[in-house]
Image (tube, rainbow, N blue to C red):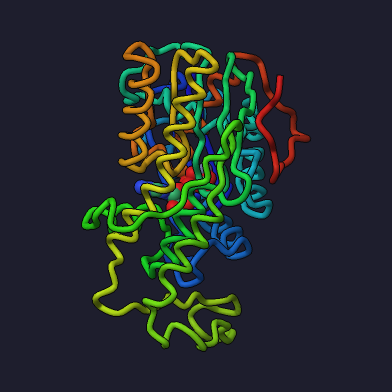
Amino acid sequence: MIVLGIETSCDETSAAVVSGGRRVLSSVVSSQFELHECHGGVVPELAARRHVTAIVPVVQQALREAEVDREDLDAIAVTQGPGLAGALVVGMNAAKGLAYALGRPLVAVNHLEAHIYANWLCDAPNLPEEPVFPILCLLVSGGHTELILMAGHGRFRHLGRTLDHAAGEAFDKGARLLGLGFPGGPAIEEAARAGGQHTFELPRAWLSGTHDFSFSGLKTALLRLTEPMRLPESYGQSDVTSATSPAGPFRAHQAPVYTASAPIADLAAAYQQAIVEPLAVKTARAAVEFGARTVVLAGGVAANALLRERLRHEVLELCGPDVPVAYPAFAYCTDNAAMVAGAAAWIVRRGDLVGWEADVHPRLPLIQR
Ligand code: KG4
Ligand code: ZN
């Protein structure tokens, strides 16, 4: 089965062709990075407009690179939600148009489910072809931090979630406080390489007795710690730009300014540790409690090397070597359409097709069965 996937839930316009739910024939991601960078975060209105101009060339490129004709496609898959409404609509309409014109089924894919199934795309290490359930998924992205138990295909149970910021959002906010740029995860990871792990100690919210997470206290602790290190120029500047400035009529982000001797690398290392540790430790404990036979990481933060390493270590300690820990290839951790096309094959297999009345769902939850 050859599926064209389309993903426009946030700030990447992406299309991909995947064969048999696993083999990626092409994966095109058009980033809007430069559009949002000066705002320090994604501006939904700008994202939607850029998707409109990017979607057709991106789909054409995906088909060209896969060396397949439109007629070779067996289904068209698209992210239905969760995500930004205006952004999702662009992908949904493009997918409907193509599916209708070609007379092919439309598959509406939950973005979170797509992140999870990215673990079964071609080069995922050490996982058997068929998923071995129950699977414990730690889904960590810019908008979500969820601990999910997957009892079978399409059978999800939420065990815990963040009570405030998502893990990716915590990375983004921390990077912003440290003047490290956007998106924050890769920026903090890079800065932390030169830092000492134990120079600063930041708080972890363990929320004992639950499978939940919390990162807002950590962010506030970083704010308090760094406030005295900032130069006065960091304050008092207007962050509202005029309609004629490069940032347009939207707010432009003013990065804080630090003294040259400020220990940014040490702070980044301590902050990264404080995000990663509760995620890895609580996931491993839940794996034992629920008898997981596979543990998978998913979402943009799954690209983080420290999290991968720490989770593998904790699960090995608590569950032994028979419970594999997997994460998607780097390219399929952050938003991409290959994961959408890949998930679609599993969804078709369980018979969950949708009709033309399918609409976007910005707050779409994972199906509870
Ligand atoms: O899954 P994703 O591309 O988009 C959402 O669905 O949210 O995740 C984006 C998030 C951002 O918050 C970004 O900072 C984070 O993933 N991220 C990382 C890394 N790469 C991306 N966080 C930590 N370490 C990374 N290497
Ligand atoms: Zn995502």
Is 210 or 42 nearer to us in this picture? 210
- Residue at x 27% of width, y 61% of height: 265
Q: Position of residue 367 (x, y in %)?
A: 69, 26
Residue 47 appears in the picture as rendered: yes
> Depth check: 213 or 56 in front?
213
Q: Position of residue 32 (x, y in %)?
A: 46, 59
| Residue 57 makes an appearance in the image | no
Q: In the figure, residue 263 lies in which quadrant? A: bottom left
Q: Quadrant of residue 50?
A: bottom right
Quadrant of the rendering where the C terminus is positioned: top right
Q: Residue at x 51, y 24 (%)?
A: 286
Along the line of sight, which residue is nearer the eye, 190 or 350?
A: 190
Q: In this picture, is 176 found above or below 172?
A: below
Instruction: Name the residue: 42% across, 34% down.
Output: 280
Left or right, residue 98 beside residue 246: right
Question: With respect to residue 265, does 138 lie above or below?
Answer: above
Q: Give x and y (percent) for residue 214.
A: 56, 47
Q: Across the whole image, how many numbered discs are drawn on residues? A: 0
Farthest-out residue, right:
357
Name the quadrant containing residue 330: top left
In the image, residue 276 lies at what x, y percent?
40, 42
As drawn, 182 above or below 204: below
